[in-house]
Image (cartoon, rainbow, N blue to C red):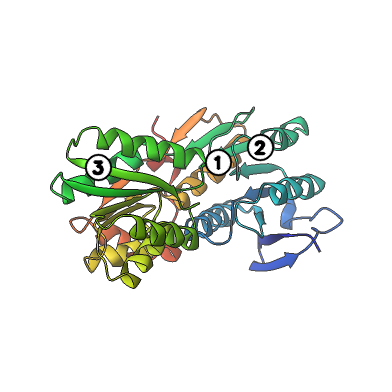
């Protein structure tokens, strides 16, 4: 048995069904209903709700357009070798389109290029990597990091000690969000960033580094995290230590919205993997239809706090994809 999982979803006149297969993909190409396009969707893990939302976004667009999606997800979160193996499996299925999030923007360059070499168009999304892709769909991660950090520092009245929790250092999203946080910190001379610890975009890792930081630092007034899942881990550590701090994350996940509403969390920044994946799938299908698409598409991010919660109180699994025109202006 291989150490990767693939989810296959077919959309056609018979309706929607799904299955999860462990091990190798089917040995013969899957024939979609009515010869609809097959979209291979690569995401980084099953642990981050943002990627579950991204997979749903790709599925919704596929359903709308009568296409099929096959999801390729490492069983071990963000595992490079497993994603490399999944590229080989996907190539054997001859998809019509690939939308691709690399688990490492350096290690996966040659593997992603195999699709282009095979004549398969690729849309990169969330994490940018080098390659000959038809477009990249993402967000301004420097702005995501900056806006969240600025909200945190202002919430601390411009003074205090802050722990910063980065995501996976192999992800450009994390590196750029850290850069944005540092840009904001430079504007607040009375804010001391105690250090940048690595939470790998995962709750358990964020919990562990926060536990250690609380031992090392008797005063932590604020915690900036590069995503909401790491805030959840930091919050568990704070509660166990009977300590409190202002908390800011990114993604706009359902749990973060609830924590903001009850006052536990100060803010989050919407980095919507859901909207990004919807747009990536739309871009790829438009390309297959011979329509022009921009070389680069930026999905706007929004700071979310208690003053503007209402639109995000709709659960992620009930939200609908934005239209092409809502994201891409002429």
Quadrant in the rendering for residue 260: bottom left
Answer left or right for 45 relative to 190: right
50 over 159 or under it: above or below:
below
Check disc 3 and report the residue beneath it: 192
For the point 39% across and 44% down, the residue is: 196
96 over 131 or under it: above or below:
below
Check disc 1 and report the residue beneath it: 170
Counting residues from the start of the chain, the first of labels 3 and 2 encountered is 2
**Callouts 1 and 2 close, C-beta under 8 Å:** yes
Q: Is residue 149 visible?
A: yes
Q: Rounded to the nearest whole Å, what is the CA distance between mark 3 and mark 1?
A: 26 Å
Quadrant in which the N terminus appears: bottom right
Answer left or right for 189 relative to 87: left
Residue at the extreme left of the image, as rendered: 157
Check disc 2 and report the residue beneath it: 107
Q: Rounded to the nearest whole Å, what is the CA distance between mark 1 and mark 2?
A: 9 Å
| Residue situated in front as seen by the camera: 255 or 272 | 255
Residue neighbourhood size for the residue with mark 3, other residues' Cα within 10 Å, grouped as few (<14), some (14–19), many (≥20): some
């Amino acid at each position: 048995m291989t150490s990767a999982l693939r989810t296959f979803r077919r959309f056609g006149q018979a309706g929607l069904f799904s299955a999860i297969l462990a091990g190798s993909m089917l040995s013969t190409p899957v024939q979609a209903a009515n010869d609809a396009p097959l979209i291979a969707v690569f995401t980084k893990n099953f642990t981050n709700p943002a990627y579950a939302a991204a997979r749903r976004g790709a599925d919704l667009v596929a359903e709308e357009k009568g296409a099929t999606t096959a999801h390729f997800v490492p069983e071990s979160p963000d595992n490079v070798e497993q994603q490399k193996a999944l590229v080989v499996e996907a190539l054997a299925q001859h998809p019509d389109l690939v939308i691709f999030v690399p688990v490492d923007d350096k290690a996966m360059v040659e593997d992603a290029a195999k699709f282009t070499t095979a004549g398969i168009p690729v849309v990169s999304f969330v994490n940018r990597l080098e390659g000959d892709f038809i477009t990249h769909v993402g967000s301004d991660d420097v702005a995501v990091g900056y806006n969240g950090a600025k909200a945190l520092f202002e919430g601390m009245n411009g003074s205090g000690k802050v722990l910063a929790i980065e995501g996976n250092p192999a992800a450009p999203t994390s590196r750029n969000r850290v850069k944005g946080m540092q840009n904001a910190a430079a504007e607040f001379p009375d804010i001391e960033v105690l250090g940048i610890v690595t939470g790998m975009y995962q709750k358990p890792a964020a919990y562990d580094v926060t536990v250690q930081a609380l031992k090392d630092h008797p005063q932590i007034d604020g915690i900036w995290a590069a995503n909401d899942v790491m805030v959840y881990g930091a919050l568990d550590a704070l509660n166990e230590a009977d300590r409190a701090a202002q908390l800011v994350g990114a993604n706009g996940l359902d749990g973060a919205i609830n924590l903001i509403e009850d006052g536990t969390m100060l803010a989050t920044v919407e980095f919507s993997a859901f909207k990004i994946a919807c747009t990536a799938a739309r871009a790829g299908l438009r390309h297959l239809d011979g329509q022009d698409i921009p070389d680069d598409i930026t999905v706007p991010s929004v700071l979310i706090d208690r003053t503007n919660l209402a639109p995000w109180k709709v659960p992620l699994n009930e939200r609908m994809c934005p239209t092409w025109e809502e994201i891409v202006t002429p």
